[in-house]
Every structure is written in C-alpha cells, then in structure tokens.
Amino acid sequence: MLRQWANSVVRIETEKRRLEILEYLMGTPGYEAAASLLRLNCQRLGVPSTMDQTIAALQWLEEQELITVRRHADEIIARITLDGREVADGTRTVPGVMRPDP
C-alpha cells in the first residue's frame, strides 16, 4: 500500500514537472531557457527537482516533440514547440503531462 502511494507521488511529481517546464518556456523570450533555470523554477513552484530529474523530463518532452533541445557550452537549452505550447495552454492533452489548471 505504501509503495503504491509512493509510486503515485512520483508519477504526479513527474507529470507536474513536465507541465511546469512547458509553462515556463511559454513565458520566456524566444520560448527557450536553460535546464538549470527550469530546475530552479520547478523547485520554486514546489516540485522537487534534481538536475537528473530535469534532464530526464527534457528528454521525455523532446521525444514527444513538445520541445527541442540543444547544447550551448555546458548547458542544455530547451525550446518549446507549437505542440508544446498547445499542451501548456491546455488546448491539447498528452498522457504523461499534467493538465494545466483552468
């Protein structure tokens, strides 16, 4: 029972982290930001996030074609796609990303 609850918490945090990344990118100039800023934003909003968790979220979002990722020096830079913007604003749903509040 406790393990099932813990798995639910991890799933919810993961889905919320993905949504927070997309929403943050929506509000940035050029629709892009560094992974380190995305991690700090998630933490600020109460979504515990290590750099490994943030990078895993970015990789997953890229696989779903909701963001693109590039490297600049030693930093990972994420940029939201049109599909990602639709998920962030609630126009479209993707399993694995929490729906935004109305």
Image: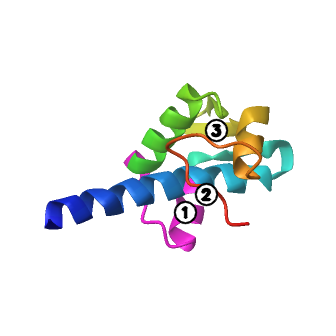
Q: Nearer the viewer, residue 102 or 48?
A: 102
Above or below residue 60? Residue 3 is below
Q: Which residue is mark 3?
A: 77
Judged by its main secondary structure, the magenta piece is helix
Residue 53, position in %: x, y? 40, 49
* Magenta-highlighted residues: 38-52
- The quadrant of the rendering that contains the C terminus is bottom right
Residue at image coords 64%, 43%? 93
- The quadrant of the rendering that contains the N terminus is bottom left
Q: Which residue is mark 2?
A: 20
Residue 48, position in %: x, y? 42, 65
Q: Earlier in the sequence, mark 2 or mark 3?
A: 2
On whether residue 9 falls in the magenta region, the answer is no
On whether residue 49 falls in the magenta region, the answer is yes
Mark linked to residue 21: none
Residue at image coords 42%, 59%? 12
In the image, is 27 to the left or to the right of 79? right
Callout count: 3
Indicate the amino acid at tag 3.
Answer: Ile
Q: Which residue is mark 1?
A: 42
Residue at the far right: name it: 29
Tag 2 and tag 1, C-beta contact below 8 Å: yes
Indicate the amino acid at tag 2.
Answer: Glu
Q: Nearer the viewer, mark 2 or mark 3?
A: 2
Mark 2: which secondary structure?
Answer: helix
Above or below residue 45? Residue 75 is above
